[in-house]
Amino acid sequence: MDPRFVFVGNRRFVLEQMLECGIQPSSIYVIAGTHLEKDFLSNKINGVNNYTLVNSKNELLSFLMKDSFDVLVSNGCPYILPVGDLPPARYVNIHPSLLPDLRGVDPVIGAILFERDSGATCHIMDEGIDTGAIISSVRIPFTNDLDVTTLYQLSFMAEKEVFIQAFDCNFAPKYKQQPGSNDIYYSRNPSDQEITFSESNDFLLQKIKAFNNRSQGCFFRVDGQLYRVYSAQRLNNSYLLKLLDKFPDCAVALSYENSIVFRKDGEILRFSDIENNDRIAISIGTILL
């Protein structure tokens, strides 16, 4: 008799892979207000007739206690499930990092922010947070050309890969996690997105790459106004370098097309794709510090 699967999550990619593998989950629990709900509403997922919308942890636990299944696959579930108190089954989670590094809610952002390798891991769910024995994993090496929006897409593909590997070995764990001294846990704090201009240029640019998805952005304040920025780069044009010699550090030398150019710590930086709710442009000569 084939095992009975249920799926719990907030994104569609692993669910799609399950369907491609010929697995029709007996129950699909969709976290309300997520991309997965939107994808169902826009008919992006084929081969699924119904799903159950979940609005809280207690509601999900109530559903699971009444359900019958052999394997629960979690992908993007925001709740820590008390697996010891749930019906006997194999509980597996697919996490978008190379565990044990980058446990936590925002591992993809953390990988860009701290310049770390990432990937995806399928692991047994235990009473901890992303701590269970590893079934399969895929590495995505860090490279400077990645930003968070690109890495999210790569992570989704890696999650599908680790599900296939885990399915092929019947979700048998291969080894226990052995945390290293350099492994980190990362769940974002709103302060991580703030630019104070006291950061090194390298870290400032990396922060913007780590939060350049449209729902996030980094932010800074000038003259009582809040601005969000989604893209930044170094500039090296010799004429521009000469022009900025006339301006002090962190003074805006050019302001155009939702962009500003300024000198900081001996380098020329451009912030582009800047947003302000009142559409107030930043004036030339404004000091950003």
Image (spheres, rainbow, N blue to C red):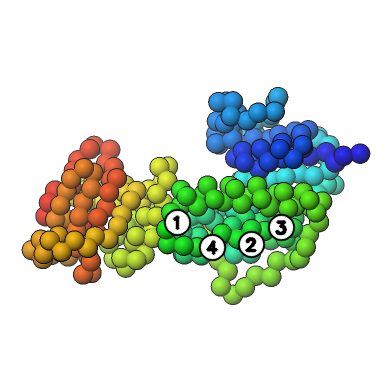
Are the two marked residues, 3 and 1, in contact with CB atoms closer than 8 angstroms?
Answer: no
Q: CA distance from mark 2 to mark 3?
A: 10 Å
| Precedes in sequence: disc 4 or disc 3 | 3
Question: Which circle, 2 or 3, is nearer the viewer?
Answer: 3
Q: CA distance from mark 3 to mark 1?
A: 24 Å
- Say which amino acid is labelled 2: Leu
Horizontally, is 169 left or right of 56 in the view?
A: right
Residue 112: x and y in percent read: 46, 59
Q: CA distance from mark 1 to mark 2?
A: 20 Å
Residue 137: x and y in percent read: 67, 58
| Precedes in sequence: disc 1 or disc 2 | 2
Residue drawn 76% across the image and 34% down it: 24
Q: Which residue is mark 2?
A: 99
Badge 4 marks a residue whose secondary structure is loop
- Say which amino acid is labelled 4: Pro
Badge 2 marks a residue whose secondary structure is loop
**Crowd class of label 4 (few under 14; some 14 to 19; many from 20; radius 10 Å):** few
